[in-house]
Amino acid sequence: MTALSLLGKPVADRLLADLTGRAQAFLARHGRPPALAVIRIGDDPDAAVYTRSLQRACRHAGIRSDDVQLSAATDERTAVATIRRLGADAAVDAIMIQTPLPQGLRRAALTDAIPPVKDVDGLSGENTGLLAQGRPRHVPATARALVLLAEASGITVAGARAVVVGRSDVVGLPAALMLLQANATVTVCHRATADLAAETRRAELLVVAVGRPGLITADMVAPGAVVLDAGTTVTADGLRGDVDAPAVAAVAAALTPVPGGVGPVTTAVLLQQVVAAAEERAEGAGRDG
Protein backbone atom coordinates (compact mmCIF):
# COMPACT_ATOMS: atom_id res chain seq x y z
CA MET A 1 0.00 0.00 0.00
CA THR A 2 1.19 3.48 -0.86
CA ALA A 3 -0.54 6.37 0.86
CA LEU A 4 -2.54 8.88 -1.12
CA SER A 5 -0.57 12.14 -1.17
CA LEU A 6 -3.08 14.57 0.30
CA LEU A 7 -2.15 17.76 -1.52
CA GLY A 8 -3.35 21.06 -0.13
CA LYS A 9 -3.72 22.91 -3.45
CA PRO A 10 -7.16 21.56 -4.46
CA VAL A 11 -8.62 22.48 -1.06
CA ALA A 12 -6.87 25.86 -1.10
CA ASP A 13 -8.11 26.60 -4.63
CA ARG A 14 -11.73 26.10 -3.57
CA LEU A 15 -11.28 28.45 -0.61
CA LEU A 16 -9.48 31.04 -2.75
CA ALA A 17 -12.21 31.04 -5.39
CA ASP A 18 -14.81 31.76 -2.71
CA LEU A 19 -12.86 34.43 -0.84
CA THR A 20 -11.76 36.18 -4.04
CA GLY A 21 -15.38 36.56 -5.07
CA ARG A 22 -16.24 37.92 -1.64
CA ALA A 23 -13.30 40.35 -1.76
CA GLN A 24 -14.48 41.64 -5.13
CA ALA A 25 -18.00 42.08 -3.78
CA PHE A 26 -16.61 43.95 -0.76
CA LEU A 27 -14.65 46.29 -3.05
CA ALA A 28 -17.77 46.98 -5.12
CA ARG A 29 -19.85 47.77 -2.04
CA HIS A 30 -17.33 49.79 -0.03
CA GLY A 31 -14.96 51.30 -2.58
CA ARG A 32 -11.87 49.65 -1.10
CA PRO A 33 -10.53 46.11 -0.77
CA PRO A 34 -10.33 44.20 2.52
CA ALA A 35 -7.06 45.20 4.24
CA LEU A 36 -4.54 43.18 6.25
CA ALA A 37 -1.67 44.63 8.31
CA VAL A 38 1.23 42.21 8.86
CA ILE A 39 3.45 43.25 11.76
CA ARG A 40 7.09 42.14 11.70
CA ILE A 41 9.39 42.98 14.60
CA GLY A 42 13.04 42.41 13.75
CA ASP A 43 14.57 41.00 10.60
CA ASP A 44 14.01 37.25 10.82
CA PRO A 45 14.66 36.00 7.26
CA ASP A 46 12.00 33.27 7.36
CA ALA A 47 9.39 35.79 8.49
CA ALA A 48 10.39 38.09 5.63
CA VAL A 49 10.04 35.27 3.09
CA TYR A 50 6.63 34.29 4.46
CA THR A 51 5.44 37.91 4.42
CA ARG A 52 6.38 38.29 0.76
CA SER A 53 4.58 35.04 -0.06
CA LEU A 54 1.52 36.20 1.86
CA GLN A 55 1.52 39.55 0.08
CA ARG A 56 1.54 37.78 -3.31
CA ALA A 57 -1.43 35.69 -2.23
CA CYS A 58 -3.24 38.81 -1.03
CA ARG A 59 -2.71 40.56 -4.37
CA HIS A 60 -4.12 37.59 -6.27
CA ALA A 61 -7.16 37.49 -3.98
CA GLY A 62 -7.87 41.22 -4.15
CA ILE A 63 -6.78 41.99 -0.58
CA ARG A 64 -4.58 44.93 0.39
CA SER A 65 -1.60 43.86 2.50
CA ASP A 66 0.56 46.31 4.48
CA ASP A 67 3.97 45.19 5.78
CA VAL A 68 4.45 47.02 9.08
CA GLN A 69 8.06 46.45 10.12
CA LEU A 70 9.51 47.46 13.48
CA SER A 71 13.13 47.15 14.55
CA ALA A 72 14.35 44.31 16.74
CA ALA A 73 15.06 46.90 19.44
CA THR A 74 11.37 47.85 19.71
CA ASP A 75 10.15 47.56 23.29
CA GLU A 76 6.82 46.03 24.25
CA ARG A 77 5.15 49.36 25.02
CA THR A 78 5.98 50.71 21.56
CA ALA A 79 4.89 47.51 19.85
CA VAL A 80 1.58 47.55 21.73
CA ALA A 81 1.04 51.21 20.81
CA THR A 82 1.60 50.38 17.13
CA ILE A 83 -0.89 47.52 17.29
CA ARG A 84 -3.48 49.70 19.03
CA ARG A 85 -3.05 52.38 16.37
CA LEU A 86 -3.74 49.80 13.67
CA GLY A 87 -6.62 48.46 15.71
CA ALA A 88 -8.21 51.92 15.72
CA ASP A 89 -7.56 52.50 12.01
CA ALA A 90 -10.87 52.17 10.15
CA ALA A 91 -8.98 51.33 6.93
CA VAL A 92 -7.40 48.21 8.48
CA ASP A 93 -9.66 45.16 8.75
CA ALA A 94 -7.24 42.53 10.02
CA ILE A 95 -3.96 42.33 11.92
CA MET A 96 -1.49 39.48 12.26
CA ILE A 97 1.83 39.37 14.12
CA GLN A 98 4.73 37.47 12.60
CA THR A 99 6.83 35.22 14.78
CA PRO A 100 9.40 34.63 16.12
CA LEU A 101 9.44 37.74 18.29
CA PRO A 102 12.62 39.33 19.65
CA GLN A 103 13.52 38.44 23.22
CA GLY A 104 11.61 40.48 25.76
CA LEU A 105 8.38 40.72 23.79
CA ARG A 106 5.46 38.61 24.99
CA ARG A 107 3.20 37.32 22.25
CA ALA A 108 0.19 37.35 24.57
CA ALA A 109 0.68 41.03 25.41
CA LEU A 110 0.80 41.92 21.72
CA THR A 111 -2.14 39.71 20.78
CA ASP A 112 -4.25 41.17 23.58
CA ALA A 113 -3.82 44.61 21.98
CA ILE A 114 -5.56 43.49 18.77
CA PRO A 115 -9.34 44.03 18.61
CA PRO A 116 -10.82 40.51 18.45
CA VAL A 117 -12.63 41.21 15.17
CA LYS A 118 -9.24 42.04 13.58
CA ASP A 119 -7.40 39.10 15.18
CA VAL A 120 -7.28 36.81 12.14
CA ASP A 121 -4.70 34.55 13.82
CA GLY A 122 -7.49 33.62 16.26
CA LEU A 123 -5.25 33.87 19.33
CA SER A 124 -6.96 36.58 21.40
CA GLY A 125 -8.70 35.54 24.58
CA GLU A 126 -12.11 36.31 23.09
CA ASN A 127 -11.55 34.31 19.91
CA THR A 128 -10.03 31.41 21.84
CA GLY A 129 -13.04 31.41 24.16
CA LEU A 130 -15.50 31.49 21.27
CA LEU A 131 -13.78 28.46 19.73
CA ALA A 132 -13.90 26.59 23.04
CA GLN A 133 -17.64 27.30 23.24
CA GLY A 134 -18.20 26.00 19.73
CA ARG A 135 -18.96 29.50 18.37
CA PRO A 136 -15.80 30.18 16.36
CA ARG A 137 -15.12 33.54 14.72
CA HIS A 138 -11.46 33.58 13.69
CA VAL A 139 -9.45 30.44 14.48
CA PRO A 140 -5.75 29.56 14.12
CA ALA A 141 -5.43 29.02 10.38
CA THR A 142 -3.24 25.90 10.48
CA ALA A 143 -5.67 24.17 12.82
CA ARG A 144 -8.60 24.93 10.52
CA ALA A 145 -6.53 23.75 7.55
CA LEU A 146 -5.97 20.40 9.25
CA VAL A 147 -9.70 19.87 9.75
CA LEU A 148 -10.42 20.77 6.12
CA LEU A 149 -7.76 18.32 4.94
CA ALA A 150 -9.18 15.61 7.19
CA GLU A 151 -12.56 16.12 5.53
CA ALA A 152 -10.95 16.13 2.07
CA SER A 153 -9.21 12.81 2.78
CA GLY A 154 -12.50 10.98 2.63
CA ILE A 155 -12.42 9.84 6.25
CA THR A 156 -15.64 10.23 8.19
CA VAL A 157 -14.51 12.56 10.96
CA ALA A 158 -17.61 12.06 13.11
CA GLY A 159 -16.94 9.05 15.30
CA ALA A 160 -13.32 8.65 14.15
CA ARG A 161 -10.56 8.01 16.67
CA ALA A 162 -8.35 11.08 16.32
CA VAL A 163 -5.00 11.57 18.01
CA VAL A 164 -3.37 15.01 18.03
CA VAL A 165 0.34 15.13 18.86
CA GLY A 166 1.12 18.61 20.17
CA ARG A 167 -0.94 20.96 22.33
CA SER A 168 0.20 24.46 21.29
CA ASP A 169 -2.45 27.17 21.23
CA VAL A 170 -1.50 27.84 17.60
CA VAL A 171 -2.11 24.35 16.15
CA GLY A 172 -2.58 21.31 18.37
CA LEU A 173 -5.10 22.52 20.92
CA PRO A 174 -7.41 24.38 18.50
CA ALA A 175 -7.24 21.46 16.04
CA ALA A 176 -8.28 19.10 18.84
CA LEU A 177 -11.20 21.37 19.76
CA MET A 178 -12.39 21.59 16.15
CA LEU A 179 -12.14 17.83 15.66
CA LEU A 180 -14.05 17.31 18.91
CA GLN A 181 -16.75 19.68 17.68
CA ALA A 182 -16.88 17.65 14.45
CA ASN A 183 -17.73 14.66 16.70
CA ALA A 184 -14.39 12.85 16.51
CA THR A 185 -13.17 11.08 19.64
CA VAL A 186 -9.99 13.01 20.39
CA THR A 187 -6.83 12.20 22.36
CA VAL A 188 -4.19 14.92 22.79
CA CYS A 189 -0.57 13.81 23.28
CA HIS A 190 2.36 15.91 24.48
CA ARG A 191 5.86 15.65 25.92
CA ALA A 192 4.58 14.03 29.13
CA THR A 193 2.66 11.28 27.30
CA ALA A 194 4.01 8.02 28.72
CA ASP A 195 3.85 5.86 25.56
CA LEU A 196 3.40 8.02 22.48
CA ALA A 197 3.58 5.13 20.02
CA ALA A 198 0.80 3.25 21.81
CA GLU A 199 -1.45 6.29 21.52
CA THR A 200 -0.68 7.11 17.88
CA ARG A 201 -1.23 3.48 16.80
CA ARG A 202 -4.84 3.80 17.99
CA ALA A 203 -5.57 6.66 15.61
CA GLU A 204 -7.68 6.45 12.50
CA LEU A 205 -6.84 10.14 12.06
CA LEU A 206 -3.38 11.21 13.25
CA VAL A 207 -2.49 14.92 13.43
CA VAL A 208 1.11 15.87 14.23
CA ALA A 209 2.27 19.41 15.04
CA VAL A 210 5.36 19.58 17.23
CA GLY A 211 8.27 20.67 15.03
CA ARG A 212 10.44 17.57 15.45
CA PRO A 213 11.48 16.18 12.06
CA GLY A 214 10.82 12.47 11.61
CA LEU A 215 9.17 12.04 15.03
CA ILE A 216 6.43 9.76 13.70
CA THR A 217 7.77 6.54 12.23
CA ALA A 218 5.96 3.74 10.41
CA ASP A 219 5.65 1.54 13.51
CA MET A 220 3.72 4.37 15.23
CA VAL A 221 0.95 4.45 12.61
CA ALA A 222 -2.03 2.12 12.24
CA PRO A 223 -2.44 0.56 8.78
CA GLY A 224 -4.93 2.62 6.78
CA ALA A 225 -4.75 5.71 8.98
CA VAL A 226 -5.00 9.26 7.65
CA VAL A 227 -1.91 11.20 8.73
CA LEU A 228 -1.82 15.01 8.69
CA ASP A 229 1.62 16.52 9.17
CA ALA A 230 1.68 20.17 10.29
CA GLY A 231 5.37 20.15 11.21
CA THR A 232 7.70 22.46 9.31
CA THR A 233 11.37 22.53 10.23
CA VAL A 234 14.11 23.97 8.04
CA THR A 235 16.99 21.48 7.85
CA ALA A 236 20.12 21.10 5.76
CA ASP A 237 18.04 18.82 3.52
CA GLY A 238 15.25 21.36 3.10
CA LEU A 239 11.86 21.68 4.76
CA ARG A 240 10.88 18.60 6.75
CA GLY A 241 7.75 17.58 8.56
CA ASP A 242 7.20 15.68 11.80
CA VAL A 243 6.46 12.45 9.93
CA ASP A 244 9.00 10.08 8.39
CA ALA A 245 7.10 10.37 5.12
CA PRO A 246 8.73 7.65 2.99
CA ALA A 247 8.24 5.02 5.69
CA VAL A 248 4.77 6.12 6.81
CA ALA A 249 3.54 6.30 3.21
CA ALA A 250 3.86 2.51 3.06
CA VAL A 251 1.43 2.14 5.98
CA ALA A 252 -1.05 5.03 5.92
CA ALA A 253 -4.04 5.46 3.63
CA ALA A 254 -3.38 9.17 3.13
CA LEU A 255 -0.56 11.52 4.11
CA THR A 256 -0.01 15.25 3.70
CA PRO A 257 3.36 16.07 2.10
CA VAL A 258 5.72 18.71 3.50
CA PRO A 259 5.80 21.09 1.73
CA GLY A 260 2.61 21.17 -0.32
CA GLY A 261 0.13 19.77 2.16
CA VAL A 262 -1.09 21.90 5.05
CA GLY A 263 0.71 25.12 4.01
CA PRO A 264 -1.39 26.19 1.01
CA VAL A 265 -4.61 25.58 2.92
CA THR A 266 -3.34 27.56 5.92
CA THR A 267 -2.72 30.60 3.71
CA ALA A 268 -6.16 30.31 2.11
CA VAL A 269 -7.86 30.02 5.52
CA LEU A 270 -6.01 33.10 6.76
CA LEU A 271 -7.11 35.14 3.74
CA GLN A 272 -10.66 33.86 4.15
CA GLN A 273 -10.62 35.21 7.70
CA VAL A 274 -9.31 38.59 6.50
CA VAL A 275 -12.33 38.90 4.22
CA ALA A 276 -14.65 37.72 7.01
CA ALA A 277 -13.18 40.36 9.34
CA ALA A 278 -13.80 43.08 6.74
CA GLU A 279 -17.38 41.89 6.26
CA GLU A 280 -18.06 41.75 10.00
CA ARG A 281 -16.64 45.23 10.56
CA ALA A 282 -18.68 46.66 7.68
CA GLU A 283 -21.86 45.04 8.98
CA GLY A 284 -21.17 46.42 12.45
CA ALA A 285 -20.62 49.92 11.07
CA GLY A 286 -23.88 49.64 9.15
CA ARG A 287 -25.80 48.71 12.27
CA ASP A 288 -24.19 51.54 14.23
CA GLY A 289 -25.21 53.99 11.50
Image: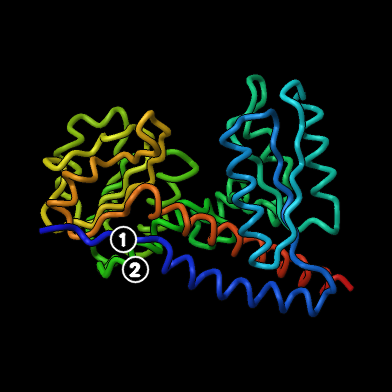
Q: Quadrant of the N terminus?
A: bottom left
Q: Which of 209 and 41 is in front in this view?
A: 41
> From mark 1 to mark 2, how far is it between C-alphas?
8 Å
Which dot, 1 or 2, sits closer to the camera?
1
What residue lies at 58% left-to-right and 57% top-to-bottom? 270
Q: Which numbered dot is residue 36?
A: none
| Disc on the earlier residue, 1 or 2 | 1
**Pointers 1 and 2 in contact (CB under 8 A)?**
yes
Residue tagged 1? 6
Q: Which numbered dot is residue 152?
A: 2
Q: Three-letter amino acid code at disc 2?
A: Ala
Q: How is the image coloured?
A: rainbow
Q: Is mark 2 on a helix, strand or loop?
A: helix
Residue 97, given in percent of the width and then of the height, sits at: 66, 41
Residue 155, given in percent of the width and then of the height, sits at: 25, 67
**Vertical order, 67 against 284 (above or below):** above
Q: Which of 64 and 283 is in front in this view?
A: 64
**Vertical order, 10 against 40 (above or below):** below
Q: How many marks?
A: 2
What residue lies at 35% left-to-right and 61% top-to-bottom? 7
Left-right relation of 14 to 214: right
Residue 179, given in percent of the width and then of the height, sits at: 36, 58
Q: Is residue 242 at all visible to an observer of this figure? A: yes
Q: Is mark 1 on a helix, strand or loop?
A: loop
Q: Is residue 167 at all visible to an observer of this figure? A: no
Q: In which quarter of the image is residue 217?
A: top left
Q: Quadrant of residue 63?
A: bottom right
Q: Nearer the viewer, residue 219 or 58?
A: 58
